Image (tube, rainbow, N blue to C red):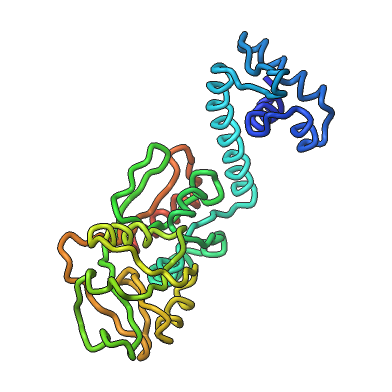
């Protein structure tokens, strides 16, 4: 079977137009037509029907079923290309959300440097939700991810190493700054500055807003902790962050939550089940485990 045929087929499922798919791949329309015919002979099934009255291309049930497998095959091929590229370059890509990178990675980096393998590490930054997908599709080999529940996925293996509470951060000028602890329900009328949707914080935050029956007034979302903290310091809004955030500033105050059954920020070392670790990558994992699980 020709992988290009599956690639053309996969795009035709999305575009429903032979000429557009041909333009996408810079090939002729007969090239796409012949690819589909080869696949239909391979599987002894009709994959598309033409509705000439409405000028539509209809995907048959057989086509829909093959589309599921084609997407899996193409995704796995893409992951294989990335994995082998990392092996050829003799490096490992480590996914790091910004808060985890700031709090945990410096002591890990010190140990990696002592073993002479820090230079083999490339980092990939992003929120835990985004990095989870990046790990699945091979952009990262290993990731330190945050979650609100223990990670359990068929394609990923997670090893938990820490749990921390979530806190509220307010400006030192905010009326709540005189408090040390509050209930989340007291924030109903507040404006919020939050991480964007690629961060697991939103999952925990949304759980608490639903539990307390209010729709939050989110005035700004960002992907950088320092930006969020600066906005909080200027009293633009309050924020909701894991307790491992180390603000070290006098213009922002941390408040503990008094709510029962609060969500927890769980940190884990995560790898793909299909990824065969090289000796160097195994050493990195051992350093991560030895440093983070102490």
Query: At which x and y percent is residue 187?
Result: 27, 73
* Left or right position of 136 against 211: right
Nearer-the-camera pick, 285 or 217: 217
| Extreme residue toward the front, this view | 53
The residue sitting at 63% across, 40% down in the picture is 81
Q: Position of residue 200 (x, y in %)?
A: 38, 58
Q: Nearer the viewer, residue 19 or 99?
A: 19
How many numbered tags mark residues here? 0
Compared with 123, 229 (above or below) is below
On screen, residue 25 versus residue 106, left or right, reads right
Residue at the (42%, 81%) spot, across then down = 236
Residue 287, position in %: x, y?
Answer: 39, 59
Q: Residue furthest right?
A: 28
Q: Tell me, yes or no, if residue 178 can be seen here.
A: yes
**Residue lying at 32% horizontally and 87% vertically, measured from the top left:** 174
Image quadrant assignment for residue 203:
bottom left
The N terminus: image quadrant: top right
Residue 51 point in image, percent of width and height: 68, 18
Q: Is residue 282 left or right of residue 71?
A: left
Q: Is residue 293 visible?
A: no
Name above or below for residue 51 compared with residue 155. above
**Quick one: quadrant of the C terminus?**
bottom left
Q: Considering only vertical position in the picture, is 136 above or below 169? A: above
For residue 205, what is the image quadrant? bottom left
Quadrant position of residue 33: top right
């Amino acid at each position: 079977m020709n992988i290009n045929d599956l690639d053309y087929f996969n795009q035709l499922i999305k575009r429903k137009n032979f000429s557009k798919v041909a333009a996408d791949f810079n090939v002729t329309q007969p090239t796409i037509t012949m690819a589909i015919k080869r696949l239909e002979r391979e599987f002894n099934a009709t994959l598309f029907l033409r509705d000439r009255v409405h000028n539509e291309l209809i995907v048959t049930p057989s086509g829909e079923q093959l589309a599921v497998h084609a997407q899996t095959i193409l995704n796995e091929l893409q992951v294989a290309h990335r994995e082998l590229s990392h092996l050829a370059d003799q490096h490992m890509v480590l996914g790091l959300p910004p808060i985890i990178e700031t709090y945990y990675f410096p002591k890990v980096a010190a140990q990696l440097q002592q073993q002479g393998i820090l230079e083999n590490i490339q980092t990939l930054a992003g929120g835990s939700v985004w990095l989870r997908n990046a790990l699945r599709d091979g952009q990262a080999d290993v990731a330190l991810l945050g979650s609100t529940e223990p990670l359990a996925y068929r394609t990923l293996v997670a090893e938990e190493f820490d749990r921390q509470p979530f806190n509220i951060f307010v400006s030192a000028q905010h009326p709540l700054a005189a408090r040390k602890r509050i209930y989340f329900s007291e924030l109903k009328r507040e404006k919020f500055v939050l991480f964007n949707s690629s961060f697991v914080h939103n999952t925990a935050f949304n759980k608490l807003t639903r539990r307390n029956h209010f729709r939050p007034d989110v005035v700004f979302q960002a992907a950088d902790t320092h930006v969020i903290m600066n906005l909080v310091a200027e009293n633009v809004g309050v924020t909701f962050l894991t307790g491992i955030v180390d603000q070290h500033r006098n213009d922002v105050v941390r408040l503990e939550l008094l709510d029962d059954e609060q969500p927890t920020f769980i940190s884990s070392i995560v790898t793909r089940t299909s990824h065969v670790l090289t000796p160097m990558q195994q050493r990195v994992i051992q350093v991560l485990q030895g440093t983070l699980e102490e």
